[in-house]
Amino acid sequence: MLKFHFGKIKFHILKFFSKFYLFLTGAVCLFILGFGFYNFVWPAYQDAKINVNSDLEETKERVEALQSYLNDLKDLRDSYDKFSTQQIQQMKDILPESKDFPALFVVAQDIGERNGLVIDGVSFSELSGDSGVSSNGITDIREVDVSLQVSEGNYSDLKNYLSDLEHHLRLFDITSISFSDTDGPYTINMKTYFMP
């Protein structure tokens, strides 16, 4: 029968550890470091690498989009610089920078007088900013509803008035005309535009 002498075994184990404790301590430390690196550091590194690559791609795309936008702005600026001061003023007359209700009233009254219409009243209302014109991506153009009350003038005068409005430099869109008799009274509803 074998007898174990725990005292001797304990002595030999202690002797072994005391002789190789530096080596064993180093091996355990390397194992712990390797385990920690493989389970914690390496996955975090891979995630960071993926995030950096995706952020880099997004940044490159954004830089390209901004560069394209800058080139478009330069082209627009070059096109704008080709216009004379008179042409620029004419564009501002077509699409003014403000709603300018007094000037609208004067235009309506002046064209009316030239065509034999008596304008009794003009009312204006700016549409809210949400309903601005959005054709071709331009959303800064605002609309103004104009309603004219005409008391005197015949059908021929009205046709001439509408023709003059059509040929006027400022943009007008007739939305409706209401009348009860060919000699008036008339109500002319229209829209005009401005770009602040």
Image (spheres, rainbow, N blue to C red):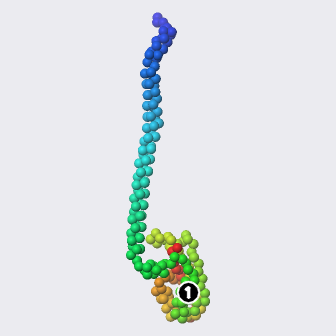
Tell me if 184 is positioned left or right of 63 in this view: right
| Image location of residue 55, percent across then percent down | 44, 50
Q: Quadrant of residue 77?
A: bottom left
> Residue at horizontal 47%, vertical 36%?
40
**In this figure, which residue is indicated by the disc labeled 1?**
106
Res 172 visible: yes
Instruction: State the SS at label 1.
Output: helix
For the point 46% across and 27% down, which residue is it?
A: 29
Depicted 123 relative to depicted 138: above or below: below
Q: Is residue 149 left or right of residue 156?
A: right
Which x, y percent locates residue 66? 42, 61
Q: Nearer the viewer, residue 156 or 54?
A: 54
Q: Nearer the viewer, residue 143 or 21?
A: 21
Residue at (60%, 87%) from the top-left corner?
121
Q: Is residue 13 visible?
A: no
- Residue type beneath disc 1: Val
x and y, in percent, of residue 104 in the image: 55, 83
Q: Is residue 13 above or below residue 158?
A: above
